[in-house]
Image: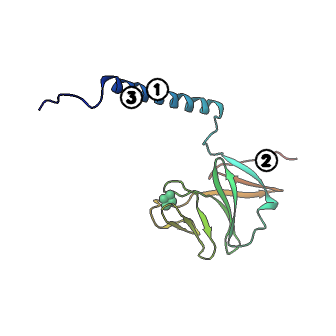
Amino acid sequence: MKIDYSLVSRRTFLNTLFGGWLLAFMGGSAYALLKFAFPTLGKEPDFILLDAGQYVDIPRNSVKPFAWGGKLGFFFKKSDGTTTALKGVCTHMECNISYRPEERKFYCACHKGWFDETGRNIAGPPPKPLEFLDVRIEGKKLIVTRKGIKVELPKA
Ligand code: FES
């Protein structure tokens, strides 16, 4: 069957094609410029230093947030008094999670994902456990590192 006329003129088609190409080119250029201007954008650090005094005295069964690169991190004091640190992002699609002390679980509101206090994924779509970080206190500093990274602070 032959169509007598087109709903889209040649000019409209070519303008749309060129406009799409121009948009993609400008988007790519803007991304490259941002990566050049901020090379650590989106990268996670190997370690961070926090003021220990602000974290070690939090109540049992609670968390205190910190910035882990551009992501959320939690200093976590469990109900038995032991402490640890973890990334505060869900392993499904990286939404921020929250701690529910009454249930002793971490919750992701994006798709109703649940993790127990050991970080194990127990309900919802998250495919793997939460990612824990190493944490230790040295003097007045709380040193939070990625697993396996060793950090030595200069002696004062
Ligand atoms: S992003 Fe957390 S459950 Fe989907």
Question: Image point 54% across, 27% down: which residue?
Answer: 29
- Kindly state the secondary structure of the residue where label 2 is placed: loop
Residue 35: assigned label: none
The residue that disc 2 covers is 153
- Disc sitting over residue 16 in the figure: 3
- Residue at the spot x=69%, y=52% of the render? 67
Q: Residues within 10 Å of mark 2 (few under 14, many from 20)?
A: few
Q: Quadrant of the N terminus?
A: top left
Label 1 and label 2: CA atoms lie apart by 50 Å
In the rendered structure, which disc, 1 or 3, sits on the residue that comes first in sequence?
3
Q: Which residue is mark 1?
A: 22
Residue 23 horizontal/vertical position (percent): 47, 30
Which residue sits at x=65%, y=35%?
Answer: 38
The amino acid type, in three-letter code, at marker 2 is Leu
Ligand 1 under 8 Å from disc 1 Cβ: no
Q: Say few, some or many: other residues with alpha carbon within 10 Å of mark 1 (under 14 / 14 to 19 / 20 or more).
A: few
